[in-house]
């Protein structure tokens, strides 16, 4: 189970208010869509880069039923999604998910080393 840093200020943050106005939804719904984006990104865009996904992919990931392009434009306009070196990214992704991303990378490396050692040990036992 993963976690992401979540601040209590999200509910009244100017970005949330702007997203709420752009989408014409209640702020709790806007926070839900943004939270869904962050949770989805932990599994499918761990580096925070969204460029390989279409607007429809992102709207689906966030459980948005309306027009996908309008939704993504609203996320961009509010500042939840931005651009870095020409790539569409989750804004400040490393600040909020950096620890879990680093932990997953360290765990993957540890398991690769463990599996390699196990393969060498098993092969040695067979010969």
Image (cartoon, grey):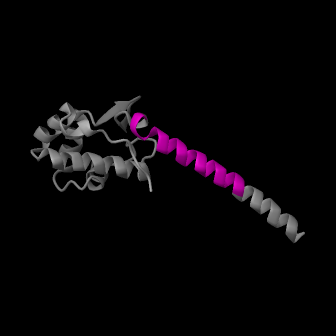
Residue 57, image x and y in percent?
31, 53
Residue drawn at x 41%, y 28% is: 85
Residue 125, image x and y in percent?
86, 68
**Quarter that holds the C terminus:** bottom right
Task: Report the side of 62 relative to 107 (left or right).
Answer: left
Comparing 60 with 91, the one in front is 91
Image quarter for residue 73? Answer: top left
Residue farthest to the bottom?
Answer: 126
Residue farthest to the top?
Answer: 85
Across the whole image, how many numbered discs are drawn on residues? 0
Task: Report the side of 73 relative to 52 (left or right).
Answer: left
Image quarter for residue 94? Answer: top left
Q: Is residue 57 above or below residue 91?
A: below
Residue 118, image x and y in percent?
75, 61
Task: Report the side of 100 relative to 107 (left or right).
Answer: left
Residue 47, image x and y in percent?
46, 42
Look at the magenta stretch and give its main secondary structure.
Answer: helix
Residue drawn at x 19%, y 38% is: 16
Q: Which region of the structure is painted magenta? A: 95-114
């Amino acid at each position: 189970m993963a976690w992401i840093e979540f601040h209590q200020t999200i509910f009244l943050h100017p970005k949330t208010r702007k997203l709420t106005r752009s989408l014409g939804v209640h702020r709790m719904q806007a926070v839900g869509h943004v939270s869904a984006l962050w949770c989805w990104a932990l599994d499918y865009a761990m580096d925070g880069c969204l460029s390989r996904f279409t607007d429809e992919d992102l709207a689906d990931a966030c459980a948005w039923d309306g027009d996908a392009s309008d939704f993504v434009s609203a996320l961009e306009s509010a500042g939840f999604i931005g651009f870095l070196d020409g790539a569409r990214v989750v804004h400040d992704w490393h600040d909020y998910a950096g620890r879990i991303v680093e932990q997953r990378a360290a765990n993957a490396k540890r398991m690769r080393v463990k599996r390699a050692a196990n393969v060498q040990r098993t092969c040695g036992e067979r010969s």
